[in-house]
Amino acid sequence: MTVWDDVVGQEAAIEVLRNAVAAAREIERTSRGARSGHGPAPDPPRGGAQQGMTHAWLISGPPGSGRSNAARAFAAALQCPDDGCGHCHQCTTALSGTHADVTLVATEHVQLRVADVRPLVSLAQRSPSGGRWRVIVIEDADRLNDSSGNVLLKAVEEPPERTVWLLCAPSADDVLTTIRSRCRRIGLRIPPVEEVAKLLVRRDGADPGVAAFAARSAQSHIGLARRLALDEAARIRRREVLKLPGKLRSVGAAVLAAGQLVEVAAEESKARTTERDAVERAALLHSLGADGLSTLPPAVRSQVRQLEENQKRRATRAQRDVLDRSLVDLLSLYRDVLVLQFGAIGGGSGVELVNAELADLLWAEAQSSTATATLRRMEAIGQARERIEANVSPLLAVEALMVQLRPAA
Ligand SMILES: [Zn+2]
């Protein structure tokens, strides 16, 4: 087993990263030789920009393709004395995010702000405590704004010898031009369904049948597939969402369905954030020496208020993400309907239904409408997603959508 095993379906990217690790070893060896006086250090290998180690990387790939997995594996391989064995202390701590020289930055805010980036820039100046590499992983580099991007730019341009930046984003185009032009790019692809299923069995101990269903339903999105495989409630919720279009008999029913969808998203995101909010609050009060006080001093109160604002923003973001996922599920339903309407299924075509377990429902929908109508509905879902992303009230956007999804009279 190695750290690369869980980076599924990304052979090309892994090859580049492994070469970089080998080049990094070479740099470590020569600089050690130079320090201990064993003759002059040889020149670094030529052409290193393409072949070898680089200080700034941009790992892009569609949601769920495993960007952050790939970044962690790379970080672990750089720290491991054995190039990423997967089981030593260096590997396990780097992968879990507790390695002293590996910093993982994930934001749930809509943007990465200057205040988020500045500490990273000073951290980047510090030598790695373990003597190998200081690795800073920014999981949402697409959320840098002009100001925070500018703060980061300088650090990415002139990094200290042993600092490595790993920026992740859905696509390179989502990252500020100034930043991405200074990064070496690694593109991840959507991993094959079978490989995602195998990963769920091997890594998460999922039942093989459930894992296959989850990987297919999640359309190879590794994180979603994992949740579907391990959480029965998530599977039930998804099924409910897919049955919604069948219930849209009238405008009233459509409005009702929209309300349900938005409410479920709110509940699910709340279930995910509430516990963490409480832990964060307790930790903050503890760090300020204010736990157990019935009345908070003003200075503490303002810090608590700041935390609460951050948590509220995070909750909004989480709710939007859950809702968006439901819309992607709906999209997969109509995609299947379209496949049936085009008669493109089976027969060595390589096309499979994402929601094969709902075949009856899909056939009924396919026969009662036309491909043109299906395409129009898919477009409406795309519009709703864009509107929600652009801050339109989720309920309004989903209501408008549900009315458009109604079957023709
Ligand atoms: Zn190791």
Image: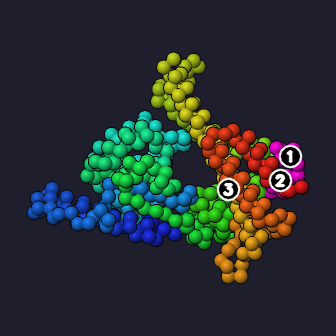
Q: Amino acid at mark 2?
A: Arg
Residue 406 marker: 2
Hey, which quadrant is residue 16 in on the image? bottom left
User: Looking at the figure, which quarter contains the N terminus?
Assistant: bottom left
Q: Is residue 303 above or below residue 186?
A: above
Q: Amino acid at mark 1?
A: Val
Q: Amino acid at mark 3?
A: Val
Q: Tell me the residue that label 3 is attached to.
A: 328
> Of callouts 1 and 3, which one flags the residue occurring earlier in the amino acid sequence?
1
Q: Report the front residue among 6 and 64.
A: 64
- Label 3 secondary element: helix
Q: Is mark 2 within 8 Å of ligand 1?
A: no
Image side of residue 4 versus residue 242, left or right: left
- Label 2 secondary element: loop
Residue at 77% across / 66% down in the picture? 371
Q: Nearer the viewer, mark 1 or mark 3?
A: 1
Residue at 86% across / 56% down in the picture? 408
Q: Tell me the residue that label 1 is attached to.
A: 251
The magenta-colored residue range is 243-256
Q: Report the front residue among 100 and 366.
A: 366
Could you tell me how far apart the alpha carbons at marks 1 and 3 are, in whole angstroms?
22 Å
> Of callouts 1 and 2, which one flags the residue occurring earlier in the amino acid sequence?
1
Hey, which quadrant is residue 34 in on the image? bottom left
Image side of residue 208 versus residue 179, left or right: right
Which class describes the residues within 10 Å of circle 2: few (<14), some (14-19), or many (20+)?
A: some
Q: Nearer the viewer, mark 2 or mark 3?
A: 2
